Image (cartoon, grey):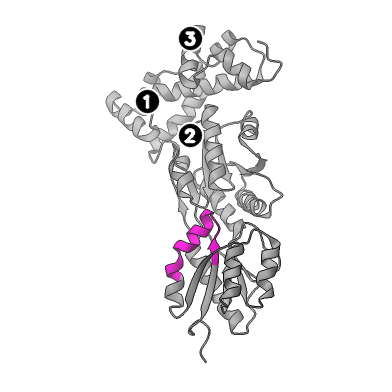
Amino acid sequence: MITSLQRSLKVALLLYDGESHGERLIQALPTLRRLVPHWMTLLLAADEQGVAAIRNSPVDGVIIRRLPEQRLVDNLLDLGIPVVQINPFSQVEGIWPLVDSDQVALGRLQAEHLLRLGHTRLAAFSYDLDQSLWRSRATGVKEAADQAGATCTFVTAADSDALHRVLEDFQAPLGIAACNDQFSYLICQACLRRGIMIPQDAAIIGIDDHQIWCESGSPTLSSVAQDHGALLAAAVRALAALLDGDRPDPVILIPPGPIIQRGSSDAPGGSDPLMARLLPMIRTLATRGLTVEDLVSRSGLGRRGFFKKFHESFGATPLDVIQGERIRVAQHLLRTSDMSLQDIGAAAGFSSPTRFSEAFRRATGATPRDWRKATGPEDSGR
């Protein structure tokens, strides 16, 4: 018996919706052509014109990501042809089967990556948890953390201002699983503006491996990819089953793609265990008079070899990293305490108010007083 996978059919693909996932599915079209070389495929925009083209030029079946309006979905279903939905942002009512990435598994993979780096405190960052996509991914993070005996908190922030507020009480080290790569980028920028070092203080990993968000900043962003080739292949098989009169599973979940590790989740100190062991020392002693010579002595290396290895691992000089930790402590005290500027400078490890002010201005572009006014509580007239 000849199945629909072997027949010459005409199939419409309503995938182009101006978003990266639609583009990734289009890039995976060679997978479809290898699987069903006899199918003629029409690549259409996922909009009113695309639905009209199907009405005017009948096809045997449709694979769709989403449509902007329910009335267009109703118009498509009224044509009475088999339709499969693939990798939507949210389920389109009335279209089954649904082929999608296993969103919970994506979150679990994020957490497992952070746990392998040694993080025992994780945070799942989402725009909100009312949307099922973000909720499923955050659930996966927490499941993996609970299984490993680590802690995991849910953090929601609708925009950059909210991100700054939730980072006010940041404590290092922390493993951050972002609901997608765009949010991962926003989190990274907010951390850096607050003096939180990535990945030394916080390791960050997103989802989708979106090249623009992952590659455009510094550090570059780690991400869990979705397997768009496998998604499209599963959608083709589901559509063929419908055309053959079978009833495929209503929901078909595809395992995640690979983890793409980049700078935002490099192991602290890179891959060098000696440099990684220095980071807790810097965090603990930077405010207590730690010097570069102390680090050289602890490393057991010669001065020149130490500086070379340190820069390769951290991308900065030892003094820059020590000063960065002092600035981070100072920022925390400026936001959360009533201490005087002089006392904050001393508590952060600076030898004089002048050196504190100069170092703070170089790091943030503002004086400690101005920075406190801009970021601290409204009643902080100190």
Q: State how far apart marks 3 and 1 are (Cα).
A: 20 Å
* Amino acid type at image mark 1: Thr
Is any part of residue 115 visible from this angle?
no
Q: Residue furthest front?
A: 56
At 59% from the left and 84% from the top, the residue drawn is: 244
Classify mark 2: helix, strand or loop. Answer: loop
Residue pointed to by mark 3: 351
Front residue of 314/257: it is 257
Residue 310 position, x and y percent, is 36, 30
Q: Does the magenta portion include 172?
A: no
Crowd class of label 1 (few under 14; some 14 to 19; many from 20; radius 10 Å): some
Residue pointed to by mark 2: 200
At 44% from the left and 33% from the top, the residue drawn is: 277
Q: Earlier in the sequence, mark 3 or mark 1?
A: 1
Q: Main secondary structure of the magenta part?
A: helix
The residues colored magenta run 14-31
Classify mark 3: helix, strand or loop. Answer: loop
Q: Determine contact: label 3, label 1, CB under 8 Å.
A: no
